[in-house]
Image (spheres, rainbow, N blue to C red):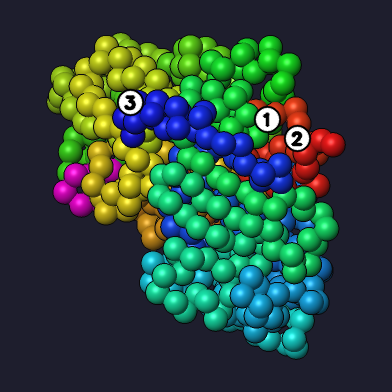
Amino acid sequence: MKRSFMMALAAGLLMSTAASAQTLKIGLNDDPDVLDPHRARTFTGRIVFASLCDKLVDITPDLKFTPELATEWAWSGDGKTLTFKLRPGVTFHDGEKMDAAAVKANLDRARTLPDSLRKSELNSVESVEVVDDLTVAVKLARPDGTLLSQLSDRAGMMLSPKAFAAADFAQKPVCSGPFKFVERVQNDRIVLERFKEHWNAKAYNFDRVVFTPIPDTTVRLANLKAGNLDLLERLAPSDVPSVKSDSKLIFAPISGIGYQGLTINTNNGDRAKTPLGQDKRIRQALQLSIDMDVVNEVVGQGIFPPATQPFPLASPYHDPKYDKRKRDVAKAKALLKEAGVEKVKFELTFGNNTTTQQIAEMIQAMAAEAGFEISLRPTEFAAMQKEATAGNFDVNVIGWSGRVDPDGNIHAFVTCKGALNDGRYCNPEIDRILNEARSITDEGKRKALYDTAQAVLLDELPIIYTYYQPWPFALSKKLDGFKPYPDGLIRLKGVKFAS
């Protein structure tokens, strides 16, 4: 979106009439894609779903699993059956009952819908059985230590089976969360209203929640300061001092469990048939040309820790031996020479928000010193992801909000049929290792497998990791009860306007 348009949007927002005192206004970094948890892939979509669609289980701020639609769960002795007891008296937004049959319908849809992005997350599931009205048993083909984590996110979100048969479900979603869908105007707003029949309605205090995508960070902050937003996610690092010095605002950062990176098209259509896509030495040279310490200092203001792997610093699966990567232009040039090229041209596509634009421009300048000629292509974020699936890209700037289980940060991105493997990188040995890691619960044995996989992946580089994603929130001091979570989602339970 062009800056002139964004400034016009800013003016419109700043002049808007104040909404009801019980309307919460949230500024998003970009516009979500489809509002169907089984088909969706954007992070901002997950933020909306956190208010719209309850899950079987959720997480606590310290990343422990906690009941939501399921009140309890238990594994069988062989680790191949996960049985859930469901919360009684829950209804969907259309009045239909949320019971074991609905859970089965949802999990079956997530596993079989042709364009479902949850298939790889649930590929261990063999069948789902209704035991009784409030008991459901998930039968697995093999033990899967990742399944509970998957069901604490979009794979575990429950939608009304009666509604998801409709062709326009992605435009008019029906879930069972504390807020229900009212309207969406693309690139302008998503409006939810309080669902009074929610099983925990008393814990939610707003009549309406309005999500407004504003990719321009300056415009987003201006609207927060003017009172036209109450809360925004992903404050630009350069704006941190301004928020800290404003007596009407609160800076609420938290370390995340995700990362940012560059996905390289190695095997997805004709645009993969390039020196960069086909020769790992050229990808290694690109990685060596980038100094993420400088990016962190200049753009990140110190809150973008450089990344070298998919597991964040606090994860027990993070391996310090991969942290030693430093920029080496001479070695990058030598690798290009060894590969038989002096200049390598490619297009770098990225979501059109201010911070990502700044990072892309720095990467462009740094890589030029090693022999890379990068053209930049800012794109509306959801459109970029659609193009990525079709293989219409050379290199994409990607971000992943992270998952509690390490599998969620790697499997879908690098296995041959991974739902988020846009570059279609494929190495059967990586598939074998990561599938084995899924079937093990022992942390030490799992880490050994991830270390083995990383040794290959960080040599072949289908993804170049750039920095670990923090979640810097900014909010009005009139809000009480907001707690940032490491997954970056906005949970509104207990949040209210100060009286």
Residue type at mark 1: give it. Answer: Leu
| Residue 79 makes an appearance in the image | yes
> Considering only order in the chain, which callout, 3 or 2, is on the residue closer to the N terminus?
3
- C-alpha distance separating marks 1 and 3: 26 Å
Is disc 2 placed on a helix, strand or loop?
strand
| Picture residue at 51% right of the left edge, 30% below the top | 15
Question: Horizontal and vertical percent for residue 499?
Answer: 84, 36
Q: In terms of depth relative to the viewer, which is nearer, 290 or 299?
A: 299
Q: Quadrant of residue 286?
A: top left
Mark 2 Cα shell of 10 Å, populated few (<14), some (14-19), many (≥20): some
Residue type at mark 3: give it. Answer: Ser
Q: Which mark is residue 479?
A: 2
Question: Horizontal and vertical percent for residue 98?
Answer: 69, 77
Relative to residue 372, is residue 468 drawn left or right?
Answer: right
- CB of mark 1 within 8 Å of CB of mark 2? yes
Residue type at mark 2: give it. Answer: Leu
| Picture residue at 38% right of the left edge, 36% below the top | 351
| Picture residue at 20% right of the left edge, 22% below the top | 373
Q: Nearer the viewer, mark 1 or mark 3?
A: 3
Question: Horizontal and vertical percent for residue 29?
Answer: 49, 36
Q: In terms of depth relative to the viewer, which is nearer, 376 or 231?
A: 231
For residue 486, above or below residue 267: above
Q: Which mark is residue 475?
A: 1
Q: Which mark is residue 4?
A: 3
For residue 52, above or below residue 106: above
The segment highlighted magenta reads 265-272
Question: Horizontal and vertical percent for residue 101?
Answer: 65, 84
Is disc 1 placed on a helix, strand or loop?
strand
